[in-house]
């Protein structure tokens, strides 16, 4: 491994002692991976980015969690600093590639923390290789009926842009331009058709879903409750008031606190020291129903 030399306009002023970069190969193509300090004996936390962008915007939350477990933030094949694949990989192919990355890193079992498209990719990995996944965190998972048809999803995405921090634009805009509008539209269309709700309702591993109250790509909370009541008991749903879609960037402290509570098996409660208010969404029917 070679220590990362961060610079503004790259991954931002995010240098942390012990963070390193690494390159592994997937089918003969180079994949770039950010590695936090090793935490011996921990189950690694692997952060999975959204569509058309790299893992750069996930770094605030990844850094906040780096002290509790070995933390990994890859750029999936075709994204960011990873080699181009020649065409955008679909959700199942990205899930397969993520498993190949874990193999290359010699990580047998991990927690996955996916934002937006990273949610469906994480669900796909959990369904295809549940023995490799200790649990998944779905931070604003995109896809499903609420995002259909495509025109509706594009309007939701446009609304979300107005709700995100302006500080995120220099981080993600170069990634969007690099990925290209045609590739982005093609993959976004596939993402909106992905059966995220069906996968979530049948999740085979412990799962935490975190939703921002200002995220236009998420269904209304009553609809979330209705769907979650059909899910297995190892699903928990948390709402962070004030967060939009890129909660990993806008509310890293609150999100990291929620994830830490869930990993430790503690009651999930708000961290008053962090922006945003986290609240566990009651989804189980009252006893006797």
Image: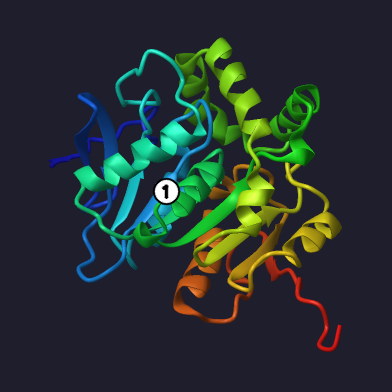
Residue 172, visible in the rendered structure: yes
Q: Which quadrant of the view contains residue 222?
A: bottom right
Residue 20, visible in the rendered structure: no
**x 22%, y 71%: residue:** 41
Front residue of 33/192: it is: 192
Residue furthest to the left: 1
Relative vertical location of residue 82 with respect to residue 101 in this rendering, above or below? above
In-image side of 141 versus 14 (left or right): right
In the image, residue 8 lies at what x, y percent?
A: 37, 30
In-image side of 105 versus 133 (left or right): left
In the image, residue 229 lies at what x, y percent?
A: 76, 67
**x 53%, y 30%: residue:** 51
In the image, residue 186 lies at what x, y percent?
A: 59, 18
Relative vertical location of residue 199 with respect to residue 7 in this rendering, above or below? below
Q: Which quadrant of the view contains residue 40?
A: bottom left
**x 50%, y 80%: residue:** 265
Quadrant that contains the N terminus = top left
Front residue of 116/63: it is: 116
Front residue of 181/106: it is: 106
Q: Which quadrant of the view contains residue 66?
A: bottom left
In-image side of 286 versus 204 (left or right): right
Colour theme: rainbow
**x 45%, y 77%: residue:** 264
Quadrant that contains the C terminus = bottom right
In the image, residue 57 lies at what x, y percent?
A: 47, 39
Q: Tag count in the figure?
A: 1
Q: Which residue is mark 1?
A: 47
Secondary structure at badge 1 equals strand
Residue furthest to the bottom: 288
Classify mark 1: residues with Cα within 10 Å, few (<14), some (14-19) or many (20+): many
């Amino acid at each position: 491994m070679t220590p990362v030399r961060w610079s503004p306009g790259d991954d931002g002023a995010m240098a942390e002692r012990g963070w390193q970069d690494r390159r592994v190969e997937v089918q003969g193509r180079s994949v770039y991976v950010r590695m936090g300090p090793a935490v011996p004996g921990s189950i690694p936390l692997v952060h999975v980015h959204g569509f058309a962008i790299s893992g750069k915007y996930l770094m605030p939350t990844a850094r906040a969690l780096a002290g509790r477990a070995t933390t990994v933030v890859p750029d999936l094949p075709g994204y960011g600093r990873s080699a181009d694949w020649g065409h955008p990989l679909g959700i199942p192919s990205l899930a397969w590639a993520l498993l190949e990355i874990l193999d290359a890193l010699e990580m047998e079992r991990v927690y996955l923390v996916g934002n937006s498209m990273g949610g469906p990719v994480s669900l796909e990995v959990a369904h295809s290789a549940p023995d490799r996944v200790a649990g998944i965190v779905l931070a604003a998972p995109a896809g499903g009926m609420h995002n259909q048809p495509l025109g509706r999803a594009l309007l939701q995405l446009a609304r979300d842009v107005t709700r995100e921090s302006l500080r995120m634009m220099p981080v993600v805009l170069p990634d969007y331009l690099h990925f290209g509008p045609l590739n982005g539209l093609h993959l976004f269309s596939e993402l909106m058709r992905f059966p995220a709700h069906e996968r979530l309702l049948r999740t085979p591993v412990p799962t935490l879903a975190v939703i921002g109250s200002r995220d236009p790509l998420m269904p209304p909370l009553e609809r979330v409750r209705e769907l979650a009541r059909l899910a297995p008991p190892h699903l928990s749903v948390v709402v962070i008031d004030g967060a939009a879609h890129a909660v990993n960037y806008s509310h890293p402290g609150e999100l990291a606190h929620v994830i830490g509570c869930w990993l430790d098996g503690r009651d999930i409660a708000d961290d008053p020291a962090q922006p945003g208010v986290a609240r566990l969404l009651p989804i189980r029917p009252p006893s006797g129903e």
